[in-house]
């Protein structure tokens, strides 16, 4: 569903569009989706309907009905934050998900569990401190080991 290569501790992106494209490209490069550009376009279309920004500095853009693979997500961090929507609020954590039709129920459970992680200040701080994909992966594993089963 994810891997070290989908952990991006220092996004280059400065806009929502760039962040989604950067994460989509990582998913395509890792073979988790076949078309990163299509994933980005669909995620942006979804964001235009209703923002996925949450109150704890997290955005969870996602695309349902992505066929040809299993549920996958990439995590990107912007230490300076990215203005996500018209509210002007910034997000530091972006979780981009590609959800096949058969994975919709599991996706809801996964997002619920990840939001429990992001609600904990200690978890957010540990993720922000990650310097590379390995340390971000380790921090995410530690933060989720009691929550996601």
Image (spheres, rainbow, N blue to C red):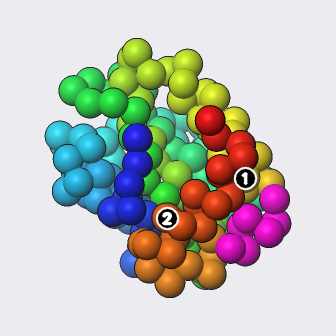
Instruction: Tell whether position 98 is magenta.
Output: no
Task: Give the label, 2 or 1, closer to the camera.
Answer: 2
Closer to the camera in the image, 7 or 143: 143
**Quadrant in the picture for the C terminus:** top right
Q: Which mark is residue 80?
A: none
**Range shown magenta:** 120-126
Closer to the camera in the image, 17 or 146: 146
Locate residue 87 relative to residue 22 in the image: left or right.
right
Residue appearing at x 72%, y 74% in the figure: 125
Percent position (x, y) of residue 85? 61, 56
Residue behind mark 2: 137
Residue appearing at x 50%, y 75% in the figure: 135
Residue behind mark 1: 117
Instruction: Tell whether position 123 is magenta.
Output: yes
| Number of disc labels | 2
Whichever of labels 2 and 1 marks the residue nearer the N terminus, that label is 1
Q: Secondary structure at mark 2?
A: helix
Give the answer, above or below, for where 72 lies relative to 68: below
Residue appearing at x 49%, y 58% in the figure: 75
């Amino acid at each position: 569903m994810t891997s070290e290569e989908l952990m991006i501790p220092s996004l280059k992106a400065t806009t929502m569009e760039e962040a989604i494209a950067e994460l989509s490209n990582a998913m395509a490069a890792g073979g988790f989706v076949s078309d990163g550009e299509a994933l980005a376009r669909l995620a942006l279309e979804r964001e235009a309907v209703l923002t996925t920004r949450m109150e704890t500095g997290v955005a969870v853009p996602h695309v349902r009905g992505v066929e040809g693979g299993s549920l996958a997500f990439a995590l990107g961090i912007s230490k300076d934050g990215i203005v996500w929507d018209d509210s002007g609020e910034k997000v530091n954590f972006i979780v981009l998900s590609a959800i096949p039709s058969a994975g919709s129920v599991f996706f809801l459970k996964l997002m619920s569990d990840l939001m429990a992680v992001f609600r904990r200040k200690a978890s957010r701080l540990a993720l922000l401190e990650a310097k590379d994909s390995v340390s971000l992966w380790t921090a995410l594993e530690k933060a989720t080991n009691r929550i996601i089963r």
